[in-house]
Image (cartoon, rainbow, N blue to C red):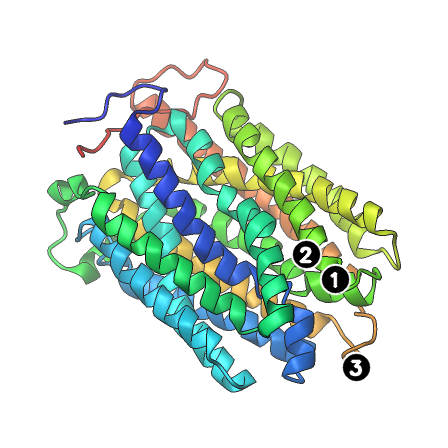
Amino acid sequence: MKIKQTNNFTDYQKFVIFILAITQFTVILDFMVMSPLGDLLIKSLDMKPSHFGIAVSAYAFSAGISGLLTAGFADRFDRKKLLLFFYTGFIAGTIFCGISTSYQVLVAARIITGLFGGVISSISMAIIADIFVLEQRGRVMGFVQMGFGASQVLGIPIGLFIANLWGWEAPFLMIAGMAILIAIFIALKLKPVNEHLKMQRDKTAFKHLLHTLVKSNYHIGYMATAVLSIGGFMMMPFGSVFAVNNLGVTEKQLPLLFMVSGVSALVIMPLIGRLSDQVSKYKLFTISCLWMIITCVIYTNLSATPLWIVMCLNVVMMMGIMGRMVPSSALTSAVPDMADRGAFMSINSSLQQIAGGIAAAVSGLIVVQKDKFSPLQHYDIVGYVVVVISLISIFLMYRVNQLAIKRAKESGLPTSTPDPESEIVPIMEV
């Protein structure tokens, strides 16, 4: 039975949103927990900031390589089976992180986790694009990406609490245990996602990958995603180190700081998602970028600051970050054809991860810490770099928006509506 093309969600669509959201929650939490554990890891494993940057970027680089290697196969299998395969590998890698005994072993574990976990987001995006029309995707992205906020509200504070009790390894084992239950739920309840298989024309996986790579209309989507990722990854790895050693936030206050930021994300995400389906996604993206730029400059130039002010600035900055993520994801999902979505999303995810890995590594080279208890230096320079990159992303997303408008015109849809890029695309059978 085909899902009716309407702006209202069916019961099954609601289930898909839920299952993808909790899957994303575990994957995002696995990556996000590295930042709040940063200060603890640096002190426990006697690492330098550059070493921690490598530990963070190891996941991103391996995820990027994995995405490129699997892109040619992404549209040749049932997306449910792909999701289960890579999610199982992600679980194994996360367990490996939890039993790591040294910095070198931890880096190896992060590489394995990235090889599998980095592809899951692109598979989820392809499933969303297959099941939901563009007019619905803003809300869908808002709900699915609530995993970002939920990881800060529930996962990170609980993870830090567990880490303080049983060591930094414990949060990874907690994530793995939760992910095992979710994998069972996916296997039993999610229906096959295979309508795209009827549209495949490329005889081999390599030809499909090459076809998706060289298609000129897709290049601007790749560039926009890569640039956005560089800006997003530069500040994040050293967030907890900066908060503890520069702003005067204590280790016990860190969970509260992340929880407040996460609650704000949980509230903001659905609102942004609904708003992006009602107004121009590009205008919303631009306003959010400018909002984040102002907050970023203020935050990275702070010294010792009262906790309540740090919390307020984090909430304000979160509004800008979330305001960029939702409309940019929805706009980018309009770039590929249905037959290329899996490959496009995999390549896009690869570029996102590789760009993020480069950003984390470069950030680790910019910031300096005399010893593991001294203030972090040059974090303000990281903030200024983020400003420049954010301005570039505004221009690139404008190009993506123009491509979406062009596709709407070619489809014969009206372009005088408030959000002309909102085209209707075929919905898969489920």
Q: In this orientation, does residue 135 appear?
A: yes
Q: Disc 3 versus disc 1: distance between alpha carbons?
A: 21 Å
Q: Residues within 10 Å of mark 1 (few under 14, many from 20)?
A: few
Q: Residue at x 27, y 49 (%)?
A: 186
Query: N-terminal of the two: label 3 or label 2?
Result: 2
Which element type, helix, strand or loop, lies under badge 2? helix
Q: Disc 2 versus disc 1: distance between alpha carbons?
A: 7 Å
What amino acid is at disc 1? Answer: Lys
Q: Residue at x 76, y 75 (%)?
A: 368
Q: Residue 118: x percent and y percent? A: 40, 60
Instruction: Tell whether 164 sits left or right of 78.
Output: right
> Eyeballing the image, is 241 above or below 429?
below
Task: Please give the label number shown on residue 255.
Answer: 2
Task: Please give the label number shown on residue 371.
Answer: 3
Residue 283: which quarter of the image?
top right
Nearest to the eye among marks 3 and 2: give it.
Answer: 2
Q: Which residue is labeled 1 in the image?
A: 252
Query: N-terminal of the two: label 3 or label 1?
Result: 1
What amino acid is at disc 3? Answer: Asp
What amino acid is at disc 2? Answer: Pro
Q: Disc 3 versus disc 2: distance between alpha carbons?
A: 24 Å
Which element type, helix, strand or loop, lies under badge 1? loop
Q: Residue 209: x percent and y percent? A: 25, 57
Instruction: Name the residue nearer the viewer: 297 or 241.
Output: 241
Q: Disc 2, disc 1: CB below 8 Å? A: yes
> Eyeballing the image, is 357 above or below 188?
below
Q: Disc 3, disc 1: CB below 8 Å? A: no
Q: Residues within 10 Å of mark 3 (few under 14, many from 20)?
A: few
Q: Residue 68: x percent and y percent? A: 33, 63
Q: Residue furthest front?
A: 165
Instruction: Tell whether 381 sits left or right of 169.
Output: right
